[in-house]
């Protein structure tokens, strides 16, 4: 007698309930269905997911663990189920603070997805690679992190869901910022991030696209322009005016790059990861301005005098505790990781009687050393705070994130204002140096009558 039970329809109802996070409904549905259905692999996956999500962790893990046991010969469908179960177990282990166990589960997801072009298995691999890369990077295993990110990127052509593509784009972005001393590979990773972000087009993906675009432009300039030394070498053959202008253009271009990253720090203060990427880029870009200047000076007609004037102004700049602070920040960023930053979430409203702003602190963390948990805290606090709102009584209220460096010279200061201080000093230094070198060159030229 033919079984009239609609398996596909039943599994579809489980999937709908899972999408709506109706965990108790899933459990009750499976309790009342025939044994041959309740023991079905897909149904068991939804049961394990529901048990985990409703807080019955031990039971949920046991159910999902059964699905990960691949006794030969394992079918494609069974491997697919195991891949999904391992991903859920990996996410759950990470949420429970067990990073080592999470890494093991996520690594198994990547192993099962190797060589597969199945969209669902590739989607699982993208999520696993994205998470595993961050875990490995946090533990100091940069090569392992890069391999995980690469796996996520390689699977992206086989998926089409915007949220999954967003994860792949972010993995490519993380890969780009983990690459040292190889502008070509970094540009390739940034281009991949841009491509996947534009395929995704979620709000976060568009933020990633803007970040990738901003990071590609200066790399493209560096990769394709002539080195400053070659630009200015001809000045020794009598073309000093034209070539000096070329050198100063390159230096000002580098200064504009630092200004761009500063603008992005200010614009992305509600997106912690993006903001930290831009802080790192700003510190590196601002510091390299003086390196570019030193390269240029060697090719000026009167290199000795130019160098002396540079060193005099450089010493003045370094005597400024703020300039020294930023040089130290850059060294920490390059060699040790992101400098510690404190985070506060403030609520602002207007006192109707005094017409003054009143601030209330909603959340605080600091100084944070940029771990996954700290970032999650900051991001979740911002999500809870939301965008500016207007309560029922009509008094305007806004939620403002504030990021500060507590060890700043003279006392704690907001990161944006501190970067603005240094950018002003650096711009003044470049302008004064150009004025000093130009006046020296003018005085050395023979006077005509």
Image (cartoon, rainbow, N blue to C red):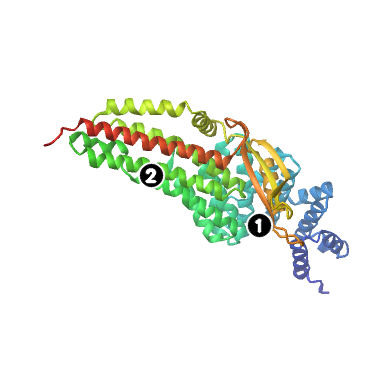
Q: Quadrant of the C terminus?
A: top left
Front-most of residues 324 and 198: 324
User: Of the residues tagged 2 and 1, which is closer to the observer?
Assistant: 2
**How far from the left and from the top, in percent, is residue 258?**
46, 42
At x 43%, y 45%, the residue is 257
The furthest residue to the front? 354
Q: Secondary structure at mark 2?
A: helix
Question: Is 157 on the left-hand or right-hand side of 227?
Answer: right
Write down the quadrant of residue 39 in the picture: bottom right
Q: Quadrant of the N terminus?
A: bottom right
**How far from the left and from the top, in percent, is residue 188?**
45, 48
Residue 73 in view, yes or no:
no
The furthest residue to the left? 449
**How far from the left and from the top, in percent, is residue 192?**
49, 52
Q: Secondary structure at mark 1?
A: helix
Question: Is 321 on the left-hand or right-hand side of 184?
Answer: right
Q: Which residue is mark 1?
A: 76
Front-most of residues 275 and 416: 416
The furthest residue to the right? 32
Residue 79 in view, yes or no:
yes
Q: Which residue is mark 2?
A: 253
At x 54%, y 51%, the residue is 153
Q: Which mark is residue 443?
A: none
**How far is disc 2 from disc 1 in space, using C-alphas?**
55 Å
Within 10 Å of disc 1 (Cα), the crowding (few <14, some 14-19, many 20+) is few
**How far from the left and from the top, in percent, is residue 424?**
46, 39
At x 51%, y 48%, the residue is 263
Within 10 Å of disc 2 (Cα), the crowding (few <14, some 14-19, many 20+) is some
Q: Earlier in the sequence, mark 2 or mark 1?
A: 1
């Amino acid at each position: 007698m033919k079984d009239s039970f609609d398996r596909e329809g039943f599994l579809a109802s489980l999937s709908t309930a899972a999408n709506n996070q109706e965990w108790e409904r899933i459990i009750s549905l499976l309790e009342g269905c025939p044994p041959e259905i309740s023991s079905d692999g897909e149904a068991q996956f939804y049961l394990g997911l529901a048990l985990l999500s409703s807080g019955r962790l031990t039971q949920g893990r046991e159910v999902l663990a059964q699905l990960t046991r691949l006794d030969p010969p394992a079918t494609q469908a069974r491997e697919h189920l195991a891949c999904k179960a391992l991903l859920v177990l990996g996410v759950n282990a990470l949420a429970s603070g067990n990073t080592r166990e999470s890494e093991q589960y996520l690594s198994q997801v990547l192993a099962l997805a190797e060589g597969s072009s199945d969209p669902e298995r590739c989607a699982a691999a993208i999520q696993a690679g994205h998470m595993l890369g961050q875990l490995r990077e946090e533990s100091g295993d940069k090569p392992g992190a890069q391999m995980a990110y690469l796996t996520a990127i390689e699977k992206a052509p086989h998926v089409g869901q915007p949220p999954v593509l967003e994860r792949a784009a972010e993995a490519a972005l993380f890969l780009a910022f983990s690459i040292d001393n190889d502008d070509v590979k970094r540009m390739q990773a940034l281009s991949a991030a841009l491509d996947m972000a534009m395929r995704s087009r979620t709000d976060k993906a568009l933020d990633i696209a803007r970040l990738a675009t901003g990071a590609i432009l200066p790399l493209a300039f560096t990769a394709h322009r002539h080195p400053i030394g070659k630009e200015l070498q001809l000045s020794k053959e009598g073309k000093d005016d034209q070539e000096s202008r070329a050198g100063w253009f390159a230096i000002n271009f580098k200064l504009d790059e630092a200004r761009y990253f500063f603008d992005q720090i200010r614009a992305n203060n509600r997106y912690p990861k993006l903001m930290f990427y831009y802080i790192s880029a700003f510190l590196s870009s601002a510091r390299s301005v003086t390196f570019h200047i030193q390269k240029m000076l060697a090719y000026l007609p009167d290199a000795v005098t130019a160098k002396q004037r540079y060193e005099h102004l450089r010493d003045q700049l370094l005597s400024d505790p703020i300039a020294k602070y930023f040089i130290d920040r850059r060294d920490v960023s390059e060699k040790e990781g992101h400098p510690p930053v404190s985070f506060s979430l403030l609520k602002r409203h207007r006192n109707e009687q005094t017409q003054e702003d009143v601030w209330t602190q909603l959340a605080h963390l600091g100084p944070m050393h940029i771990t996954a948990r700290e970032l999650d805290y900051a991001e979740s606090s911002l999500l809870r705070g939301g965008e500016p709102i207007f309560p029922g009584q009509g008094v305007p209220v806004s939620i403002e994130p504030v990021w500060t460096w507590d060890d700043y010279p003279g006392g704690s200061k907001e990161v944006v204002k501190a970067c603005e201080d240094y950018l002003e000093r650096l711009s003044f230094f470049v302008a004064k140096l150009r004025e000093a070198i130009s006046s020296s060159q003018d005085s050395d030229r023979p006077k005509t009558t």
